[in-house]
Amino acid sequence: MTTVTVFEHAPPPLIGVCGVVPDRAFEAFEGVTDALATDGPRCLPLILVDGVIVSSGVHPTRTQLARVVGQHRSQTEPTAAR
């Protein structure tokens, strides 16, 4: 199964009764820290397909995203023996 991960600009923190509550979903930047360290927020949105950066800094169209996912899938699926 192909996994698509999208990292966007973080929304402002939620304000709760007890103070600021950070959104834990935005703590998952471990695999893209190099891109963030190099380009900063300019690289967002950052789109990964199976952990590989396929788009940076722009929102791809549905057609472009489908093409990238399809190409990645064909590269990772083993070919059947005949």
Image (cartoon, rainbow, N blue to C red):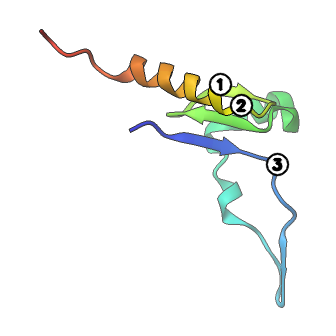
Q: Is residue 18 above or below residue 4?
A: below
- Residue at coordinates 28% horizontally, 19% vertically from top-left? 78
Kindly indicate the quadrant of the structure image that contains residue 52: top right
At mark 2, the secondary structure is loop
Rendered location of residue 60, percent (x, y)? 72, 30
Q: Tell me the distance, in whole angstroms, between the alpha carbons under discs 2 and 1.
A: 5 Å
Q: Which residue is mark 2?
A: 61
Which callout, 1 or 3, points to the residue nearer the camera?
1
Kindly indicate the quadrant of the structure image that contains residue 80: top left
Rendered location of residue 6, percent (x, y)? 66, 43
Residue extending farthest to the front is: 63
At mark 3, the secondary structure is loop
- Residue at coordinates 81% horizontally, 30% vertically from top-left? 57
Quarter of the C terminus within the rendering: top left
Residue 72 shown left or right of residue 12 in the figure:
left
Q: Tell me which amino acid carries mark 2.
A: Thr
Residue 33 shown left or right of residue 71 in the figure:
right
Q: Residues within 10 Å of mark 1 (few under 14, many from 20)?
A: few
Quarter of the N terminus within the rendering: top left
Q: Which residue is mark 3?
A: 9
Q: Residues within 10 Å of mark 2 (few under 14, many from 20)?
A: few
Rendered location of residue 12, percent (x, y)? 87, 64
Q: Which residue is mark 1?
A: 64
At mark 1, the secondary structure is helix
Q: Evaluate if marks 2 and 1 touch, with contact meaning CB atoms under 8 Å apart.
A: yes
Residue extending farthest to the bottom is: 17
Mark 1 or mark 3, earlier in chain: 3
Kindly indicate the quadrant of the structure image that contains residue 76: top left
